[in-house]
Image (tube, rainbow, N blue to C red):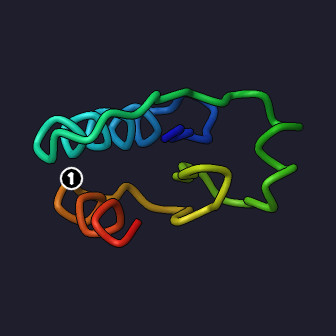
Amino acid sequence: MIIKILGSGCKNCTALKENTEKALKETGIEAEVIKVQDMKDIVSYGVMQTPALVIDEKVVSFGKVLKSNEIIKILEKR
């Protein structure tokens, strides 16, 4: 599984990355977490608000910082 955090590197983007890593640790799911900061790449996903969470090339959230329990719920549906 590849998880991408889309954002400029702001406080919210960092928080989303930390919450994602916490959710992965809690569930024992192995995934590669990648930060995407290039605006051209971010726009290519159709995302106009950051931070955004992309799992296996599918945008699952944008414009807010998900808590780790919210990320776990998304991961469990996959």
Residue name at image x 61 percent, y 38 percent: 7
> According to the image, label 1 marks what residue?
68
Q: How many marks do you count on the picture? A: 1
Is label 1 in a helix, a strand or a loop?
Answer: helix
Q: Quadrant of residue 35?
A: top right
Image position of 67 with respect to 41: above or below: below
| Image side of residue 9 versus residue 47, left or right | left
- In the image shown, does 48 or 58 lie closer to the viewer? 58
Q: Position of residue 57 (x, y in %)?
A: 67, 51
Classed neighbour count for the residue bearing mark 1: other residues with Cα under 10 Å, few (<14), some (14–19), many (≥20)? some
| Image side of residue 56 versus residue 75, left or right | right
Residue name at image x 33 percent, y 60 percent: 75
**Amino acid type, residue under disc 1 in the picture:** Ser
Image position of 25 with respect to 55: above or below: above
Q: Position of residue 56 (x, y in %)?
A: 59, 50
| Image side of residue 24 versus residue 52, left or right | left
**Quadrant, the C terminus:** bottom left
Residue name at image x 40 percent, y 31 percent: 14
Q: Position of residue 1 (x, y in %)?
A: 48, 41
Image position of 63 with respect to 52: above or below: below
- In the image shown, does 43 or 56 lie closer to the viewer? 56
Q: Position of residue 77 (x, y in %)?
A: 35, 72
